Image (spheres, grey):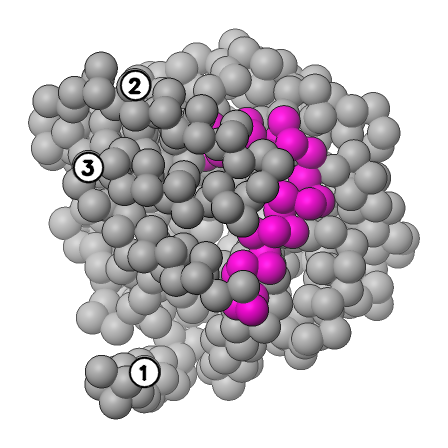
Amino acid sequence: MVNKAKQKAAQHLAVMAYKCLQENPEAGLPKLLKLFDVLDTKDSYKSGRDFIRTILGDPSNTWYRYLLAIWEDVDSEVRFTFFQTFFLNSLLKGREDQRLLREEHQCNLPWAILVDPTTSCNLHCTGCWAADYEKGTYLSYEILDALVEEGKNLGTFMYLFSGGEPLMRKSDIIALCDAHPDCCFLAFTNGTLIDEAFASAMLRVKNLSVAISIEGDEAATDERRGKGTYAKAIKAMSILKRYKLLYGISCCYTSQNVQTIGSEAFIDSMLELGAKFAWFFTYIPIGRDAVPSLMVSAGQRAFMYQQVRSFRKSKPIFTMDFWNDGEYVDGCIAGGRCYVHINAQGDIEPCAFIHYSDSNIYTTSLLDAFKRPLFQQYKERQPFNNNPLRPCPLLDNPEQLREMVHASGAVSTDLASVESVDDLTAKCDQASKDWAVSADRLWEDHATSSILCV
């Protein structure tokens, strides 16, 4: 069993150490890292700790500049709350609790829960499945609150919101942040509803950040999201920057905008606006109005693979590509292995892009859902490919998703129109074959370069 008293004492020491380094992070961060060595009793994050220790030893390192920028640009109380909720509660306490619960229940337990509080949205973006949804479906505040409470009992302290447009539920999201100060919250938003009042509320609760969806430059963003959307998103970022809040961007790269999103100029412009992280997603053809031509080619995906890795060496911004970074997380993170998705009608789905389920929060507890056939299929099959650059059971290994859905008896949960798993995966078959050639070559080159560096 986890020694709760020791765990609590160590966390208290970490908080005290953090407060001591407020004025001098360069001197205090190495001391704080030593305490993390003590807290991480199972060495779950040893590689990460070693990486940070390397950074702190080299002031010229890009990541060193990133850490100092966090200190300079983010409100001190917001930064401290993030330290408590994300690092202490979510990464350390939560993951250690989950390690034991996984052994006891023999199922995946998610580090993060992504939930759609509503299907409503004030935009109608090209290729977005949510644009087809009826606007009256939502999860009440009481249901959302109970969901967070249930998740915390399973060691989950990280909650993300998508939609629809989650900020259509501004007041409820702020209320959840108030009710659960021990949790870390993030909303994926188009940014058009962010104003001074909402930024002030974020600053007050301190445990909410946002990722603003942007498609690259003004032309690319407005073409997909509607005229004037880019300007509103940039205005939102300027407000967040002025309030010294923690925020970033969410970018869906398509065949039409990949060169823009993958450009150094774009990343530099987002850094200038104060973004501290960038989530990259590739376009997936989901729903009846999907536009398969927006899927990137194998060459374009390889371009993003190279560009994101280049940015990590030269740009002080945290980047993550959820399809090209499988090597860092051992493949697919869905199915409760790291995260799970719950849509606005309560269906518990393995992933935001996999609209199939065999359980619903109105009739099934989270723990029972993770023990049901669909999530057990994920647990038994992950990773889905020996090449971590081919992690996804839809885009990279469509035969895996077909088999899992059929074997589990899961049904389509698409809120606009039922789509069979055979029809969905058929749209990805050729892309998966094309990418396999490029991905295998990239991974072989990676392995060779790693050997040469030893």
In the picture provided, is 376 more to the left or to the right than 308? left
Which one is nearer the viewer's eye here, 193 or 223?
A: 193
List x then y, in percent, for residue 77. 63, 27
Mark 1 / mark 2, whichever is N-terminal? 2
- Residues at marks 1 and 3, CA–CA distance in whole angstroms: 31 Å
Can you tell which quarter of the image residue 11 is in? top left
SS at mark 1 in the image? helix
List x then y, in percent, for residue 181. 52, 17
Residue behind mark 3:
41
Viewport quadrant of the N terminus:
top left
Mark 2 / mark 3, whichever is N-terminal? 2
Can you tell which quarter of the image residue 6 is in? top left
Residue behind mark 2:
8
Which one is nearer the viewer's eye here, 289 or 93?
A: 93
Q: Which mark is residue 446?
A: 1
Mark 1 / mark 3, whichever is N-terminal? 3
Q: Which mark is residue 233?
A: none
Can you tell which quarter of the image residue 314 is in? bottom right
Judge the density around disc 3: few (<14), some (14-19), many (≥20) Cα neighbours within 10 Å.
some
- Which residues make up the magenta segment? 60-86
Is residue 342 visible in the rendered image? The answer is: no
